Image (cartoon, rainbow, N blue to C red):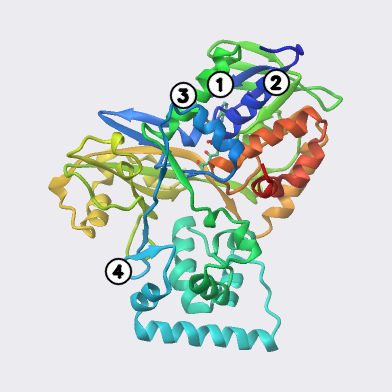
């Protein structure tokens, strides 16, 4: 299907890489897709375990643009369906719906806490009239905009537990992305009127059309990969890259593989969707001399503890956020609620998520080593130890970019260095160090390819944060 004799090598067969490969092939390029695991889908993949379909933590697709949704639908054989997501938060010990409803929130917090929340908020606002407060960190931003009590209760302590960092170390950029409506006023106005601020509308948090492939979201990605391969692309699964060859005139020439066989793959263009530090490592630091040990650009690992329960269902919720600090895990999800096809009728699969580093002892724990923690957490939901039938883990390396204060400056410097290389682009959630979902990762894959072949690498790195918003707002 290729007609211009040029080869685009894509590293990573996750949502971003597949979308880039799809576009490259559609535009007439020969595509070589390299993937280190045995299946397509990246973190949006699905596997089989016994008679369960298991995602890397259930992944719902946010339908935000027609273009990407069409691509997903065309590769789902009619199985990509709308789902009505139900989510609960345990901020206190009683659950509260998400998105929050004002009456439910007020009743849930109780009179004493509501008064404290309002009092703290007015103290913080009054203080800000007289003293200029800096807002560089998640904590400073959160306390200034919500008051200490609401901030601690809903965001601050949870963020610290999840990332195991002081929220003073976490960048305000992350706060702007994660904190709904960005202030107590905005939050209340949003709750009462459903009118959201401009910044808020730009966030994926208010996208409410979720979809899921009835047989596991990974099936859609596998179909996209299959289509690309059937049309003539070369796909190399279970590959191990040895190095990426860069010439003196700042061009990537080829990729050397160790596995599945020693091989040199020449490329005219290279699209990388792997973490930034891995890309730099493969080029032997030729594309930037940044020292990643400085840790301003680093990623956190995730362990998903998968638990089969010998009962039909735990709850009707898709995600339950375990905000209250009595919990060890960050989030609980139930795969069956995304699609009944994913589990047998009489059993259910629960996934408990925790963010870790490789130095944490739990990172290496296998199935039954988790039993005590699982029993304690699920005990809260009235699950007895007898109902816990099987426990196993899914490890996800570098699953969350860690946005530390000052990371932006470092990231910009790295991307400026990358921009000198005109035939390579680093994109996707990990290649651009962004907190994006699958939809936006796919936009970044497709757009990354377009900017690359239009010789606009530098512009891509300048535009990358806006690209998804522009696409969302584009009338089609
Ligand atoms: C726990 C969790 C839950 C999430 N839930 C949702 C959700 O419900 N909905 C949603 O839309 N998004 C969700 N996300 C985000 C979603 O997973 C990402 O946005 C998406 O997977 C990013 O796609 P990507 O292609 O950029 O990266 P990835 O999915 O990570 O794909 C990168 C690919 O590159 C491969 N690779 C890595 N290194 C190499 C190498 N050296 N050589 C070759 N191949 C390599 C990987 O194996 C992988 O296949 C979640 C993320 C996490 C961590």
Question: In terms of sequence position, does the residue under pointer 4 or pointer 1 come before the other?
Answer: 4
Q: Which residue, given by chain and number where applicable, does mark 3 sit on?
A: 39
Secondary structure type for disc 3:
loop
Where is the N terminus found, in terms of image quarters?
top right
Question: Real-space Cα distance between discs 3 and 1?
Answer: 14 Å
Q: Which residue, given by chain and number where applicable, does mark 2 sit on?
A: 8
Displayed quadrant of residue 250: top right
Q: Is residue 303 placed above or below 35 in the rendered structure?
A: below
Secondary structure type for disc 4:
loop
Residue at the farthest left position: 386
Where is the C terminus found, in terms of image quarters?
top right
Residue 448 got which mark?
none
Whether ligand 1 has any atom under 8 Å from the Cβ at mark 1 is answered as: yes
The structure residue drawn at horizontal position 18% and vertical position 57%, both measured from the top left corner, is: 382
Viewer-nearest of discs 1 and 2: 2
Q: Is residue 142 placed above or below 119 in the rendered structure?
A: above
Viewer-nearest of discs 4 and 1: 4
Q: 110 or 401: nearer the eye?
A: 110
Question: Real-space Cα distance between discs 4 and 1?
Answer: 48 Å
Q: Is any atom of residue 275 visible in this view?
A: no
Residue 94 got which mark?
4
Displayed quadrant of residue 184: bottom right
Secondary structure type for disc 1:
strand
């Amino acid at each position: 299907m290729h007609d211009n004799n040029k080869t685009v090598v894509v590293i990573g067969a996750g949502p971003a890489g597949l979308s880039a490969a799809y576009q490259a092939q559609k535009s007439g390029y020969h595509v070589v897709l390299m993937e280190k695991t045995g299946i397509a889908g990246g973190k949006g993949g699905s596997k089989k375990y016994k008679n369960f379909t298991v995602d890397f933590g259930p992944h719902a697709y946010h339908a935000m643009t027609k273009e990407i949704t069409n691509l997903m639908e065309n590769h789902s054989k009619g199985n990509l369906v709308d789902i009505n997501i139900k989510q609960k938060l345990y901020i206190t010990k009683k659950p509260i719906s998400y998105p929050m409803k004002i009456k439910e929130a007020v009743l849930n917090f109780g009179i004493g806490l509501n008064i404290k929340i309002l009092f703290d908020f007015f103290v913080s606002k009054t203080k800000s009239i007289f003293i200029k407060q800096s807002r560089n960190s998640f904590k400073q931003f959160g306390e200034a905009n919500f008051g200490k009590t609401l901030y601690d209760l809903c965001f601050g302590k949870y963020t610290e537990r999840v990332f195991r960092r002081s929220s003073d170390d976490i960048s305000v950029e992350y706060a702007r992305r994660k904190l709904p409506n960005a202030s107590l006023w905005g939050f209340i106005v949003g709750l009462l009127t459903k009118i959201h601020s401009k910044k808020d509308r730009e966030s994926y948090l208010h996208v409410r059309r979720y979809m899921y492939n009835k047989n596991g979201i990974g099936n859609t990605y596998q179909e996209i990969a299959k289509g690309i391969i059937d049309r003539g692309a070369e796909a190399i699964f279970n590959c191990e890259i040895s190095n990426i060859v860069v010439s003196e005139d700042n061009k990537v020439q080829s990729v050397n593989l160790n596995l599945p066989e020693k091989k040199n793959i020449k490329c005219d263009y290279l699209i990388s969707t792997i973490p930034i530090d891995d890309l730099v490592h493969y080029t032997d630091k030729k594309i930037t001399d940044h020292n990643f040990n400085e840790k301003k650009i680093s990623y956190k690992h995730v362990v998903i503890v998968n638990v089969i329960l010998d009962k039909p269902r735990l709850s009707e919720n898709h995600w339950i956020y375990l905000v209250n600090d009595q919990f060890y895990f960050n989030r609980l999800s139930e795969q069956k609620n995304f699609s009944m096809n994913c589990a047998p009728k009489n059993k259910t699969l629960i996934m408990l998520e925790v963010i870790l580093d490789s130095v944490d002892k739990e990172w290496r724990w296998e199935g039954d080593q988790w039993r005590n923690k699982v029993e304690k957490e699920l005990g809260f939901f009235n699950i007895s130890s007898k109902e816990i039938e099987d426990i196993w883990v899914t490890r996800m390396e570098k699953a969350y970019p860690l946005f530390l204060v000052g990371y932006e400056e470092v990231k910009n410097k790295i991307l400026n260095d990358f921009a000198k290389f005109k035939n390579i682009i680093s994109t996707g959630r990990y290649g651009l160090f962004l907190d994006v979902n699958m939809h936006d990762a796919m936009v970044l894959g497709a757009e990354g390819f377009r900017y690359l072949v239009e010789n606009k690498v530098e512009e891509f790195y300048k535009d990358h944060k806006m690209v998804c918003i522009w696409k969302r707002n584009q009338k089609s």
